[in-house]
Amino acid sequence: MKVREYKIGESTIEIHDDYIVKTEEERQEILSRVGKLYSDYLSTTGEEPQTA
């Protein structure tokens, strides 16, 4: 089930509660990817992303 959606530029990030991260490494990889998208967006636009 989708619990949150972020629009960042032309990208959409959906947060679902049905995915279970099994290791700390998986958790860090996901956070790193989302952080990279967020950082790239901020450096390009200087704007906060919109939440749906």
Image (cartoon, rainbow, N blue to C red):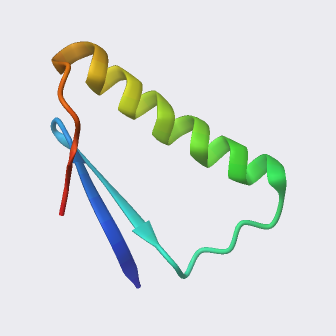
Q: Position of residue 13 (x, y in %)?
A: 34, 53
Q: Using the rendered view, name the quadrant where residue 40 is placed.
A: top left
Residue in view at x 83 percent, y 59 percent: 23
Q: Using the rendered view, name the quadrant where residue 37 is placed.
A: top left
User: What count of labels does the image hold?
Assistant: 0
Residue in view at x 60 percent, y 48 percent: 30
Q: Is residue 42 above or below residue 43?
A: below
Q: Most extreme residue toward the top, as rendered?
A: 43
Q: Is residue 1 above or below residue 37?
A: below
Q: Position of residue 29 (x, y in %)?
A: 67, 42
Quarter of the image with the C terminus is: bottom left
Residue in view at x 40 percent, y 24 percent: 39
On screen, residue 2 versus residue 50, left or right, reads: right
On screen, residue 29 versus residue 46, left or right, reads: right
Q: Using the rendered view, name the quadrant where residue 20 is placed.
A: bottom right
On screen, residue 5 versus residue 32, left or right, reads: left
Q: Is residue 18 above or below residue 35?
A: below
Quarter of the image with the N terminus is: bottom left
Q: Is residue 26 above or below residue 19?
A: above
Q: Position of residue 6 (x, y in %)?
A: 27, 54
Residue in view at x 47 percent, y 28 percent: 36
